[in-house]
Image (cartoon, coloured by chain):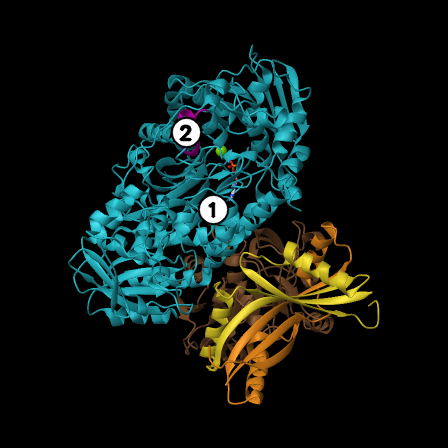
Chain colours: A yellow, B cyan, C brown, D orange
């Protein structure tokens, strides 16, 4: 079976986000003053083949912890869904 | 974080001793509160106060006719280079942050050293990086190298300062505790010099740059500890760098310093707001009062302790003349920077800190900044020292193929071309780079402001310093000087970054003390004063301390473009000559480590008088136009130096070769080929100049050997007619050029 | 004398290099233009230099395109005057739509700084007029995002209008995947707009105008500008 | 009222994703062969103050189209929710 894991990696709240700050300032200077804060992160979409949803989920978490996420400064959220329509 | 009651346990937790605490109480005439304890603990940490090293650092020569600002007086020293110009340069370590988070650790290291330079009023024009890692066969080492190089590349490229040189060694001793030392050099007109002083009662204190967060609280104390599992828990003290913010700060500060509205300026580095306020006050012989509520803050609910100790990056403190505030604010506004007027200069010598009007800190600034205790640590010669020194190396077998050893050495990541690294660095921006990384022994920069050029390099062989710290320290300076001499420069001054293990261990302290004495002696001999530097202790991993690694950053002055010399052979038919002794032992060599797995032996004889003669003969010959290429003989010895001069000689596929015949010898041939005796320079000269060069060297009591000629395509090395090495340049070039990259992909 | 203007954004870092190269080797009349300026019509040629405008945060060149000066540059370009964007300047021109396409990260995902060879495949522009067709020059690149992308229709259009100006090649002018440093579509290193008066290029001509720095091949670009401006005056 | 807009920006399917490919290869070399595909994108979180959800939504789309997304190579998805607990 095939699953798609959507992973959102963000900086921990206390960590400085230079990109987000700069984008916020840019939006303000463009007149979008009602944008109060901007935080930037990464998005990743993994296509995983696995026997079960649980196995796919375990694998995705494993991959996040081992490679995709830098636990020193980042955290992540993960959502998984079965790929409908089988193989792409 | 919450305020805590000050108890002895808490004092010890802050890394202070009971005696130090008593001293604090007597300075204050009372017990410190929680915030004040934090303030003292960072200012009196090893990192800020140099309490364990200062006694020995005083051995360094720091004066000279060109010195305008001496080591230790300000953030960085200043050296006159004539024509109304001066330079400021310094090296600093970011080892511990880089071990925990290589990308951000290295990036913020670059940010920090750049601030040290522009705070002096100099425009930074060059960076160098001196790196040490474990063996690349370990995945974690590859991860660290990748992260560190990306971090330096990210910050240096973005801010637009070229990384023009550096060095990397790979040795198991650094596994788990990499060394990341970064160097920055800036240039200024004499009249643009700025100082980190607060004076003039009533003058305003401005905070400018990034907002303060809870970054790196206790970074300074963190750097003063060994790495262990606990350091993992301290991970929040990792900071994220913002090179864009720093670029704005750099431009705004330099623009600001063109006005006369500024009394003093200081970056906020280790110990942040605490260090910058008490040091400026102390240097200016004044007091300072600030209101923390006015400090721009990134996070909610920070307490005074946190605001004062935060090590958020990209912040500066500026002391502005009363009445000139608007002018200053206009410049910061132009650069989209938020500047906050957070206080003023006082006349009572106190560092006074308010929080919403309430007094939270009141400490005599001078005593806080300058009266940390100075310790004379115990030292003891380690057992390994004599054992290694007297090790009998005669049983070590000669290799079956010298050619194979040559290739092995050329592909050894410590020796191989570092293209994979320096191509990730913008080394050309600012358009001064006349000799780029990988071309020569040092980088050469032209100056747009005058006819002169600068040569610069970092150097240190930790293995030599392990085997013999005193001689190793001398060699670090000698090799650095030799590298710039090979480019046609007269060495001017040095900066040093002393990377050692735990100074509380007597054997480590012995290494430290001996290295310092060796460096100090060499600096006196070469008349290159020390203009500043940095000490990094506690470089240990679970297996013990790293090899003592006192990295030397050197800068030399080249009078004219005509003197710029590179390492590569230039033309077939030119004569290859060795300046300096030909024979060498194999003790302490990369050959011994790579081919035989040994870190031992007595270092080959080192005579500093000979070293000086070799260097001055080489420089004189360069200035007289007699030398077409000059290359320092270092790791890998004569054979590797010959190979490098050949490989570097060609553009793309047209590399040059050489054919040399070494004089008959009774010494071991692996030593002659790969031994690392110092005081040797490989040069090539036009056939018509051979006699002159030969006579000149002999008249100056420098050994000189006519080895052979520059050829095409092959490197042939024989010894009294017997062929030892015969390789196609294309083959050895491939190994030299591609090995580091293939390790990393 | 012909007036050159070098635009300075927060984070530009090749602004001084362009200024210096022009002043030393091209025209004494060169000035910086602060990105908040609204008056640029007195210049003859606008240079948008390299660097990391706004830190290259979000996307390279994305934030700079909202600076006041961009509106001016748009009018300037529409009136037929010369605009050259180098490296980050090229990225800005793409972001603000004065040139077609977009930049992606180098396929190596690493910043690359080195000398490469560049083939002039269109010598019929004001920026290449003093170079013969097919001329190969040695010039540095220094970028992390120089992987030029354009969709197939856009590429066909570029070709139809002869808008491809420079391609990465080897010393002999051969264009192949091996000589592509960053993954750009068809080794594209520089393009111009349909009218030919706006050029974007990733390599840095200002870094190789001075023979002391190892190559003066970049001078040809500035000399071409000078030549075509002098003719048109 | 305060709203949080979560924006995911991805490369159009027709655009090659060098970063995603590299991550995929790294995962394969680590033994995660069941990860069949990786696509990388950007995640952004905007805090917006607006009178109504519709206004916040309009603003977020506006900001995406004008600054956050480059339509030549990227597409985006947006989701908005009201910030509970009011101002932070
Ligand atoms: N980390 C680095 N960053 C930039 N340049 C480097 C780095 N390491 C080595 N280089 C460059 O590669 C060349 C050779 O350096 P190195 O191997 O230290 O030479 P040597 O043995 O002559 O001291 C020099 O130009 C040096 O500046
Ligand atoms: Mg050398």
Image coords of residue B381 (percent x, y): 41, 23
User: Does the segment drawn in magenta span residue B477?
Assistant: yes
Q: Regarding mark 1 in the picture, which secondary structure is present there?
A: helix
Q: Regarding mark 2 in the picture, which secondary structure is present there?
A: helix
User: Is D69 located above or below residue D58 in the figure?
Assistant: above
User: Does the segment drawn in magenta span residue B356?
Assistant: no
Marks 1 and 2, how far apart in space? 20 Å
Label 2 crowd (10 A; few <14 / some 14-19 / many >=20): many
Mark 1 lies on residue: B96
Mark 2 lies on residue: B511
In the foreground, C200 or A44: A44
Circles 1 and 2, Cβ within 8 Å, touching? The answer is: no
Residue B681 visible in the snapshot: yes
User: Is D8 located above or below residue B725 in the figure?
Assistant: below
Judged left or right of residue B488, residue D40 is right
Label 1 crowd (10 A; few <14 / some 14-19 / many >=20): many
Residue B630 visible in the snapshot: no
Label 1 in the same subunit as label 2: yes
Magenta region, mostly helix, strand or loop? Answer: helix
Spot the residue most to the top: B666
- Taking the spot 56% from the left edge, 50% from the top edge, the residue there is B147
In the foreground, A50 or C170: A50
Q: How many marks?
A: 2
Spot the residue most to the right: A86
Q: Which residues are magenta?
A: B468-481
């Amino acid at each position: 079976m095939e699953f798609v894991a959507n992973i959102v990696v963000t900086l921990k709240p206390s960590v400085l986000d230079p990109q987000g700050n700069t984008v916020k300032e840019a939006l303000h200077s463009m007149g979008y003053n009602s944008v109060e804060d901007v935080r930037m992160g990464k998005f990743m979409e993994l296509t995983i083949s696995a026997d079960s949803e649980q196995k796919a989920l375990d694998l995705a978490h494993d991959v996040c912890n081992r490679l995709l996420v830098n636990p020193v400064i980042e955290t992540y959220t993960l959502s998984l869904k079965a790929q409908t329509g089988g193989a792409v | 974080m919450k305020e805590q009651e000050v108890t002895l346990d808490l004092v010890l937790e802050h890394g202070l001793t009971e005696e130090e605490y008593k001293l604090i109480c007597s300075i204050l005439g009372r017990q410190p509160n929680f915030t004040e304890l934090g303030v003292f603990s960072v200012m009196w940490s090893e990192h800020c106060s140099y309490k364990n090293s200062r006694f020995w650092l005083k051995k360094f020569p720091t004066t000279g006719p060109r010195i305008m600002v001496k080591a230790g007086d300000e953030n960085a020293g200043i050296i006159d280079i004539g024509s109304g110009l001066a330079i400021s340069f310094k090296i600093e370590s970011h080892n511990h942050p880089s071990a925990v988070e290589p990308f951000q650790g290295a990036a913020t290291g670059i940010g920090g050293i750049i601030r040290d330079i522009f705070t002096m009023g100099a425009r930074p024009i060059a960076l160098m990086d001196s790196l040490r890692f474990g063996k690349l066969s370990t995945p974690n080492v590859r991860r660290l190298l990748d992260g560190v190089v990306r971090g330096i590349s990210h910050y240096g490229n973005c801010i637009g300062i070229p990384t023009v040189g550096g060095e990397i060694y790979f040795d198991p001793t650094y596994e788990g505790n990499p060394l990341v030392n970064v160097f920055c050099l800036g240039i200024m007109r004499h009249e643009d010099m700025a100082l980190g002083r607060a004076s003039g009662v009533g003058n305003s204190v401005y905070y400018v740059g990034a907002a303060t967060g809870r970054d790196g609280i206790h970074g300074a104390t963190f750097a003063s500890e060994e790495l262990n599992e606990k350091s993992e828990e301290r991970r929040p003290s990792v900071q994220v760098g913002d090179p864009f913010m720093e670029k704005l700060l750099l431009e705004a500060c330099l623009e600001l310093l063109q006005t006369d509205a500024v009394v003093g300026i200081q970056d906020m580095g280790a110990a942040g707001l605490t260090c910058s306020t008490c040091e400026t006050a102390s240097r200016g012989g004044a007091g300072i009062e600030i209101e923390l509520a006015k400090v721009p803050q990134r996070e909610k609910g920070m307490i005074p302790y946190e605001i004062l100790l935060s090590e958020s990056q990209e912040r500066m403190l500026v002391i502005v003349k009363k009445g000139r505030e608007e002018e200053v604010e206009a410049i910061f506004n132009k650069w989209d920077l938020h500047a906050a007027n957070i206080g003023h200069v006082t006349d009572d010598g106190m560092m006074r800190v308010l929080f919403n009007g309430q007094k939270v800190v009141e400490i005599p600034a001078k005593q806080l900044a300058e009266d940390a205790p100075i310790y004379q640590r115990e030292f003891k010669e380690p057992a390994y020292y004599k054992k290694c020194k007297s090790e009998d190396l005669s049983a070590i077998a000669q290799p079956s193929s010298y050619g194979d050893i040559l290739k092995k050495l050329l592909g050894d990541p410590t020796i191989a071309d570092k293209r994979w690294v320096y191509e990730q660095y913008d080394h050309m921006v600012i358009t001064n780079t006349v000799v780029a990384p990988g071309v020569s022994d040092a980088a050469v920069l032209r100056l747009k402001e005058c006819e002169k050029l600068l040569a610069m390099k970092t150097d240190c062989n930790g293995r030599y310093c392990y085997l013999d710290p005193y001689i190793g320290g001398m060699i670090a300076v000698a090799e650095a000087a030799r590298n710039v001499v090979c480019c046609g420069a007269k060495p001017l001054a040095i900066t040093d970054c002393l990377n050692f293990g735990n100074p509380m261990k007597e054997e480590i302290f012995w290494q430290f003390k001996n290295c310092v004495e060796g460096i100090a002696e060499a600096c006196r001999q070469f008349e290159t004063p020390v203009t500043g530097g940095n000490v990094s202790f506690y470089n240990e991993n679970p297996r013990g301390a790293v090899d003592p690694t006192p990295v030397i950053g050197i800068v030399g002055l080249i009078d004219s473009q005509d003197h710029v010399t590179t390492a590569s052979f230039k033309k077939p038919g030119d004569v290859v000559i060795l300046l300096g002794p030909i024979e060498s032992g194999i003790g302490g060599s990369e050959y011994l480590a790579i081919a035989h797995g040994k870190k031992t032996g007595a270092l080959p004889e080192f005579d500093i008088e000979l070293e000086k003669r070799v260097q001055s003969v080489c420089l004189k010959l360069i200035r007289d136009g007699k030398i077409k290429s000059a290359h320092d003989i270092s790791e890998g010895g004569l054979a590797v130096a010959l190979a490098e001069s050949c490989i570097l000689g060609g553009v793309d596929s047209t590399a040059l070769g050489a054919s040399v015949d070494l004089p008959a010898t009774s010494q071991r041939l692996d030593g002659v080929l790969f031994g690392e005796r110092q005081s040797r320079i490989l040069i090539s000269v036009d056939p018509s100049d051979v006699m002159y060069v030969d006579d000149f060297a002999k008249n100056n009591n420098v050994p000189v050997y006519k080895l052979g000629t520059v050829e095409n395509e092959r490197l042939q090395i024989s010894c009294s007619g017997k062929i030892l090495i015969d390789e196609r340049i294309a083959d050895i070039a491939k190994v030299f050029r591609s090995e580091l990259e293939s390790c990393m992909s | 004398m012909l007036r050159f203007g070098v635009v300075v954004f927060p984070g530009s870092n090749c602004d001084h290099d362009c200024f210096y190269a022009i002043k030393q080797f091209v025209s004494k009349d060169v000035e910086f233009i602060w990105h908040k300026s609204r008056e640029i019509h007195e210049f003859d040629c606008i240079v948008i230099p390299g660097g990391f405008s706004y830190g290259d945060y979000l996307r390279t060149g994305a934030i700079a395109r909202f600076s006041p000066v961009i509106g001016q540059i748009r009018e300037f370009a529409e009136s037929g005057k010369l605009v050259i964007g180098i490296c980050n300047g090229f990225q800005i021109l793409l972001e603000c739509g004065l040139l077609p396409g977009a930049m992606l990260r180098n396929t190596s995902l690493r910043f690359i700084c080195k000398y490469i060879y560049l083939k002039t495949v269109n010598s019929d522009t004001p920026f290449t007029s003093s170079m013969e067709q097919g001329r190969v020059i040695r010039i540095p690149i220094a970028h992390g995002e120089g992987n030029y992308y354009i969709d197939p229709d856009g590429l066909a259009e570029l070709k139809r209008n002869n808008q491809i100006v420079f391609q990465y090649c080897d010393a002999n002018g051969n264009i192949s995947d091996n000589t592509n440093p960053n993954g750009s579509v068809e080794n594209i290193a520089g393009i111009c707009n349909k009218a030919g008066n706006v050029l974007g290029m990733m390599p840095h001509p200002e870094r190789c105008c001075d023979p002391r720095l190892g190559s003066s091949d970049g001078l040809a670009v500035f000399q071409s500008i000078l030549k075509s401006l002098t003719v048109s005056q």
